[in-house]
Every structure is written in structure tokens, then in C-alpha cells.
Image (cartoon, rainbow, N blue to C red):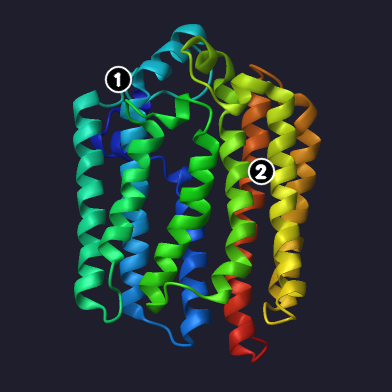
Amino acid sequence: MHPAFASPLRRWLYAVKPASWPKVLAPALLGQVLGYMSAGTWSWGGAAVGLAFAACATCYVVLLNDWFDADVDAIKRQMFPEAGSPKTIPDGVLPAESVMLAGAGFGTMAAAIALCGELFLPGRAGLALAGLAALLLLVVYSAPPIRVNDRGGGELVEAAGVGLLVPWLSAYAQSGHATSSWYAWALPGLALLALSSAVASGLSDEESDRRAGKRTLTTLLGNDVARRTAEYAAFAGLVAWMLAVRLSGGAFPIVPAQAALLAAALPWRDMMRESPHALTNRFKSQARYKTALHRLVWGATLVLAVGLVAARWLGWA
């Protein structure tokens, strides 16, 4: 075992991958803001339920995805012994059974939180069922026999889950509104940004995924097409927020959308500067490329959320 993992606490902190949390927590926070914009009032109970569900669901997804993908991770370690960070199960950071049980435990807690939200927050009928649907999405994504992530549709499922279902559930927990024009204005752009993140995530696993028979956009179409797809999707997501300003007749305020664009500018420059170097098996360049892209995607999402709240307080929305 790597000496950095001598402490059990460090092993578990590593296993839940805090660096990946913005992928779920940023959309959940934007969902909270969209619910607030829709209802016009802030619910602390709705915030607690929505964000606690997102935190537990993140750990559930991270741990069980590692458990389901342990065979693919083992292939990558055999192919590239020194590449990338240690793998939780193949490199012995934690036993497979412990990872599976902890993941199931976090999933159970997330389901219980959604049920409590439905029982104790007025006007949240169906919240528990929506939470269960979000959790079952991982089964569709990673678990046999369906295992969409092996069949060429994993990126779309992840984009739908992270970019649509998670923020919608968080917005519903906050507001009790199942539908709202605010959701229609903001979520298509977020889904495109989530698709960008999902596509980029597969770059560093191209050859090991291909050997394991895993069909991702990167293994099917190659590194160059995957990078271009991630970049176009990120650009389209930002443009979608600007289009929402026009299509809403200005009801979706322009300043937060512009602020999100500005927040994306520097990460976009870094991403495009690194893109020509993020080739197959160039793991360090790929890591820098993905870091810049994720800063762009989730940084712009958080700036939009903060900007919408500020616009409401200033009377612009």
C-alpha cells in the first residue's frame, strides 16, 4: 500500500474523491438557487435536504462506481503501472467489500434524506421517488446487466443525471415546484456542460477501456473527437445560458449569464492551450486539460448560481 494511506481516515477520504464532488454539488447548488428563484422564498429545510442528499449521493456514486469498475481499473493498472493516481480497489487502498458496503450505506442515507424531505417539508410529494430514481441511475450507468457506460451511452446518462435530474431534485426540495420557467432556462445549458465533463473524464482511460471492451465516446471515436466534443459541448452550454436571456425576454437576467461567461474565460484559455498535448496516454497533459475543463464547467455553474441570487436581491430578477 502507498505510504500516504497508512491512516484509515486518509484511505476513506481518498476513496470518496473530494476533488470530484463539484460535479454533483455545483449542479445541486444551482438547483437550490433555481428553486429559490421560482418560489421567491428560501427554505432552510429544503436546502438541508437537497444538499445533504447530493453529498450522500456523491459518495454513493463514487464508491459503487469504483466497485463496479474494479476489473477495468485493474486492467489499467496492469497496462500502466506508474500512470495516474492509485486505484482504490486494485491498489489495495481499501478492500472491495468495504467499498461496496460503504457505497450502499451512503445510498441508503441519501434515500432516507429524500424520504424525510417528502414527509416533513410541505408540498414535496414524490420527492422520495425522485431521489430513488436518481440513485437507480447508477445501476443503469455502471451495474450489470444494463451497464450503459459499457455500451456507448454512458456520457449521455451522466449528463442527464448530473445536468438535469440532480439540479431538478434539488430545486424541487427547495421550492416544492415540480416545474418552473427557471428550470427551462438554466438546465439545458447545465446539461451540455455536464456532457462536456462526462466526455472529458474518459480520455485517460482510452486504451484500458478499449481492452476491457468498454464502449465510450473516446474508445469508439478516438481522443481527438472526444476532446472536440467536450470543447463544443462546453461552449454550447455557455451559449445556451445567453440564449435563455433572449428567449425569456430578459426574465432570465443577463448579468449572471455574462458573469458565468467571464468566469469561464481563463479556464477556457488554459484548456485550449493544453488540448493539443492531451493525446492518448499523455496522462499528465490529460490531467491538466481535464482540470481546466472542470474549472470552466463547475466554476461557471457556481458563478451563475451566485449571480442569480444577487440579481434577485438587487431587484433585477
Query: Can residue 164 be spotted in the picture?
Result: yes
Q: Residue at x 37, y 28 (%)?
A: 4
On the image, the x and y values in percent for residue 125 come to: 28, 72
Is 128 situated above or below 97? below
Comparing 85 with 245, the one in front is: 245
Comparing 179 with 250, the one in front is: 179
Question: Label 1 sits on what residue type?
Answer: Gly
SS of the residue under disc 2: helix
Question: Label 2 sits on what residue type?
Answer: Leu
Q: Residue at x 25, y 32 (%)?
A: 99
In which image quadrant can residue 314 be found? bottom right
Dot 2 corresponds to which residue?
293
Indicate left or right for 316 with 1 as reference.
Answer: right
Comparing 28 with 151, the one in front is: 151
Dot 1 corresponds to which residue?
92
Is 107 situated above or below 240? above
Count residues near mark 1 (Cα–Cα under 10 Å), then give few for <14, some for 14-19, many for 20+: some
Count residues near mark 2 (Cα–Cα under 10 Å), then give few for <14, some for 14-19, many for 20+: many
Indicate left or right for 259 with 58 as reference.
Answer: right
On the image, the x and y values in percent for residue 208 come to: 51, 14
Indicate left or right for 149 with 310 as reference.
Answer: left
Is 163 situated above or below 198? below
